[in-house]
Amino acid sequence: MSTSFCAAQILNPQPKEVTQKFFPDFDVEITTPAFQKKKGFTTYSEMMAYLKPLSENHQDIATLSYIGESQKGEKIPFLLLNKKDSNQEKVKVWIQAAIHGDEPASAEGVLFLIKKLLTDDSYQYLFDKLEIGIIPMANIDGFNKQLRDAKNGLDLNRDQTKLNAKESIILKQAFSDFNAEVALDFHEYRPFRRDFVHYAEYGVTNPYDVMFLYSGNLNVPENLREFTKNEFVDPAKSYLKENDLRSFDYFSTSDCQGYTCFNLGSINARSSATSYALTNAISTLIEVRGVGLGNFLQTKNDDHFFNRRIIFKIGL
């Protein structure tokens, strides 16, 4: 493990003053488990204690089941939201979070979204149009330790073709059984990258609150690729802009013989954006600015804009 990686993981490179000026929280009440304690992210057991009463109190819409077990034997939850007394034809939407265990706002944001959908009357009309299947924590073993990979050391979002991890097989089967028409995979990205230190006097950071990764694989029909961009990603970007949130297409960087190369888009079926798209689903991986920026410290006033990292999901 390199020194630069350790520093990025342990130390928060973003001063509190920068957070308050450029990444302020929104004035919205959030009651998910992490916001009910002074320090730390939501654990698996806290998530289940949160989900069970929600589903039991809304049995006309919510059904909580389990699709299998993690490598450590934790049950992987699947929450189906579907108005049972409606016979209308609906669009099937798949939502997945926390396939990377060190991206806590993905799971927390989806828990926030679930409660909004079930308890806020202004969202009830959606159940006349949508059937929503949710995996709120795909990589339970990694999440409980805030580690990216699964117990066997595999990155589950690089394992969707070889299926070497137990969880990969379970998630693939559940996705296939659900037969989604729209698929969203929530992540967080690292805004302070090693390659960025070469720019300016002290390096630069990626400022985007949300980044969208959608497939450019040529085996995905061109009309589906265009529809995904024009009818989902672009309107989502417009919504975010209207609400003072910055967005862009997702890019990563790599070293190319001493130069920094910027890589845009997804073509590899081993990760979700393309894997889902190859089933003819409108597929987007949604990255939120957050990895390496710390977690809750001692008070909610010093939480490194965790509020901001999850609040945008209610609009997408």
Image (cartoon, rainbow, N blue to C red):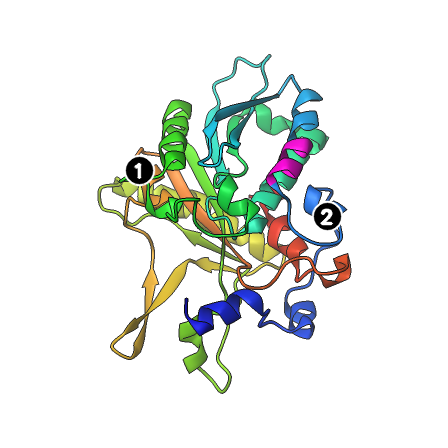
The image position of residue 256, as x and y in percent, is 26, 73
**The C terminus lies in which quarter of the figure?**
top right
Q: Residue furthest bottom?
A: 201
Q: Is residue 315 visible?
A: no
**The N terminus lies in which quarter of the figure?**
bottom left
Q: Is residue 290 visible?
A: yes
Relative to 218, 148 lies left or right: right
Q: CA distance from mark 1 to mark 2?
A: 35 Å
Q: Residue furthest left?
A: 219
| Residue shown at the point (68%, 27%) measured from the top left | 54
Q: Amino acid at mark 2?
A: Phe
Whichever of labels 1 and 2 marks the residue nearer the N terminus, that label is 2
Can you say whether 259 is above or below 94 in the image? below
Can you say whether 287 is above or below 196 in the image? above
Residue extent of the magenta highlight: 44-50
Can you say whether 220 is above or below 299 in the image? above
Residue to which mark 2 is pinned: 35
Residue to which mark 1 is pinned: 163
- Under circle 1, the secondary element is loop
Q: Is residue 46 magenta?
A: yes
| Residue shown at the point (67%, 54%) measured from the top left | 307
Quick one: label 1, few (<14), some, or many (20+) residues within 10 Å? some
